[in-house]
Amino acid sequence: VQLQASGGGLVQPGGSLQLLCAASSGIFVSMGWYRQAPGEQRELVANIESDGSTDYADSAKGRFSISRDYAKRTVTLQMNSLKSEDTAVYYCNAVAIVTRKTYWGQGTLVTVSS
């Protein structure tokens, strides 16, 4: 299984970005996005379970939205009203439904700056 993340880039404060993660194969009980800022630990941004339930970091609530396309094995993170503190490398994550093995994408850099 390989996870390919895309969509990062440079955006001004208040702007929007959409991150996309595509899995090469597999069926997942959950898919999500984590981020890691310089000098910080990796933290959960948002997660979506196979039943559609979602979980967001407090910092993401009201601004970010996560969704899945089960047929395409993709997970999307729509990020609005971006702030400088959202600057980080964003990693997609998926947990296999049978083995419960966790997979990580390669990371995509999001920079929020004027």
Image (cartoon, rainbow, N blue to C red):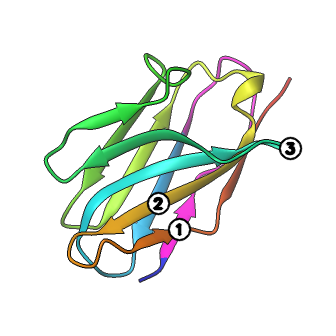
* Res 16 seen here: yes
Q: Are marks 2 and 3 in contact (CB under 8 Å)?
A: no
State the mark number for residue 104.
1
- Identify which residue, 12 or 46, lies in the foreground: 46
Q: Residue tagged by mark 3?
A: 39
Residue 6 lies in magenta, yes or no? yes
User: Would you say 93 lies left or right of 36 here?
Assistant: left
Secondary structure under badge 1?
Answer: strand
When the figure is inspected, residue 45 is found, relative to residue 9, above or below; the finding is above
Residue shown at the point (35%, 65%) measured from the top left: 95
User: Would you say 3 lies left or right of 112 here?
Assistant: left
C-alpha span from label 2 to label 3: 21 Å
Residue 23's image quarter?
Answer: bottom left
Q: Which residues, given as a range, are shown in magenta? A: 3-17
Q: Nearer the viewer, mark 2 or mark 3?
A: 3
Disc 3 residue type? Gly
Residue 46 lies in magenta, yes or no? no
When the figure is inspected, residue 103 is found, relative to residue 16, above or below; the finding is below
The C terminus - image quarter: top right
C-alpha span from label 1 to label 2: 5 Å
C-alpha span from label 1 to label 3: 20 Å
Q: Residue tagged by mark 2?
A: 93
The earlier-in-sequence mark between 1 and 3 is 3
State the mark number for residue 34.
none
